[in-house]
Amino acid sequence: MHPLPHHYKVVTSGGPFGNLIAKGIDEDLPPIEINAPVQYGGPKNTWSPETLLPASLSSCLILTFDSVAEANHFHWHKIECQADGTLDRKDGVRYFVHFSLKTKLFVPPGTDKEKARRLLRKAEENCLITQSLKGSVELESEIIENQ
């Protein structure tokens, strides 16, 4: 890991009509198209800030879990994480008040499932996106043995 602080730079551009284009400045990232979510009149086929936030949360959980699992010599095959963010108004301010994470962790037969749950909780507690959110985060996990 590089020494802190880290900086992540993105430039987003667009006009009054059509999608915005976001590009990473310092990294060779492919551009992504962004628009308003359907709930605010945007198209169904484009990422929005509101969908990117749960995607950031679920991918951060998975990447943090990978690091935690490696540090604990824990073997696993695959993980899926469904993130659901609830946007609401409280005290006259709209913000994400709650996030629900539902994970499915696929592990080798005979794996200690309680250890898997502990490591998933540790990943959720140490995920920097989780730590940066105002709303609460709830983690629900299913451990599935497979070959």
Image (spheres, grey):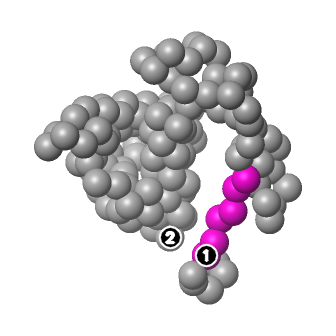
Would you say the residues marked 1 and 2 are in contact, meaning their CB atoms lie under 8 Å apart? no
In the image, what residue occupies the spot 66% across and 81% down?
A: 2
Q: Is residue 69 visible?
A: no
> What distance separates the C-alpha of mark 1 from that of mark 2?
22 Å
Relative depth, front residue between 109 and 28: 28
Q: Amino acid at mark 1?
A: His
Relative depth, front residue between 51 and 120: 51
Q: Is residue 90 above or below residue 25?
A: above
What residue is shown with label 1? 6
Q: Amino acid at mark 2?
A: Ala
Q: Residue furthest front?
A: 16
Q: Residue furthest right?
A: 28
Q: Is residue 134 visible?
A: yes
Q: Which residues are magenta?
A: 6-11
Q: Is residue 67 left or right of residue 92?
A: right
Image quadrant of residue 3? Answer: bottom right
In the rendered image, the quadrant that contains the N terminus is: bottom right
Q: Is residue 10 magenta?
A: yes
Q: Is residue 17 magenta?
A: no
The numbered disc on residue 129 is none
Q: Earlier in the sequence, mark 1 or mark 2?
A: 1
10 Å neighbourhood of mark 2: few (<14), some, or many (≥20)? few
Q: Is residue 14 left or right of residue 74?
A: right
In the image, what residue occupies the spot 73% across and 32% down?
A: 15
What residue is shown with label 2? 71
Q: Is residue 34 left or right of residue 126?
A: right
Image quadrant of residue 84? Answer: top left
In the image, what residue occupies the spot 74% across and 36% down?
A: 14
Q: Is residue 108 left or right of residue 122?
A: right
Q: Is residue 135 above or below residue 72?
A: above
